[in-house]
């Protein structure tokens, strides 16, 4: 478990993430993180659940229309 301290950042509040934690999350300065409410609390993740839903829909379309997309690519 990693303890994080809420600190002032300008007129806002924020947390400082260690290099170790950034590496575990596989993010760098400027990347987006998502705070997702789960039954066990708040999860901090680089995973965007909305984007995942969109990618699932795109994959379904690509599989169903594979022949058409192949012709269009030629």
Image (tube, rainbow, N blue to C red):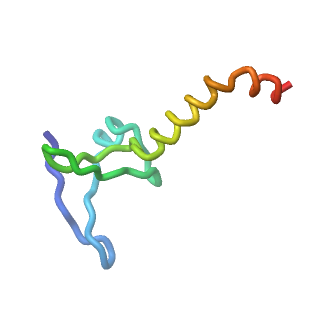
Q: Quadrant of the N terminus?
A: top left
Horizontal arrangement in the rendering, residue 62 relative to residue 38 (left or right): right
Q: Is residue 15 above or below residue 72?
A: below
In the rendered image, residue 73, in percent from the top left (x then y), is placed at 81, 28
Horizontal arrangement in the rendering, residue 13 relative to residue 34 (left or right): left
In the rendered image, residue 63, in percent from the top left (x then y), is placed at 61, 23
Give the mark count.
0
Q: Quadrant of the C terminus?
A: top right
Horizontal arrangement in the rendering, residue 49 relative to residue 64 (left or right): left
In the rendered image, residue 41, in percent from the top left (x then y), is placed at 15, 48
Q: What residue is shown at x 14% (from left), y 49% (from top)?
A: 3
In the rendered image, residue 9, in percent from the top left (x then y), is placed at 30, 71
Q: Quadrant of residue 26?
A: top left
- Between 34 and 66, which is closer to the camera in this rendering? 66
Direction right: furthest residue = 74
Q: What residue is shown at x 30% (from left), y 74% (from top)?
A: 12
Direction front: furthest residue = 64
Q: What residue is shown at x 16% (from left), y 43% (from top)?
A: 2
Direction bottom: furthest residue = 11
Q: What residue is shown at x 21% (from left), y 66% (from top)?
A: 7
- Between 37 and 9, which is closer to the camera in this rendering? 37
Q: Quadrant of residue 65?
A: top right
- Between 32 and 18, which is closer to the camera in this rendering? 32
């Amino acid at each position: 478990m990693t303890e994080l301290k809420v600190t002032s950042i300008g007129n806002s509040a924020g947390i400082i993430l260690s290099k170790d934690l950034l590496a575990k999350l596989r993010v760098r300065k400027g990347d987006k993180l998502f705070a997702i409410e789960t039954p066990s609390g708040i999860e901090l993740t680089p995973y965007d659940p909305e984007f995942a839903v969109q990618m699932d829909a795109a994959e379904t379309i690509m599989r169903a229309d594979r022949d058409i997309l192949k012709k269009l690519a030629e």
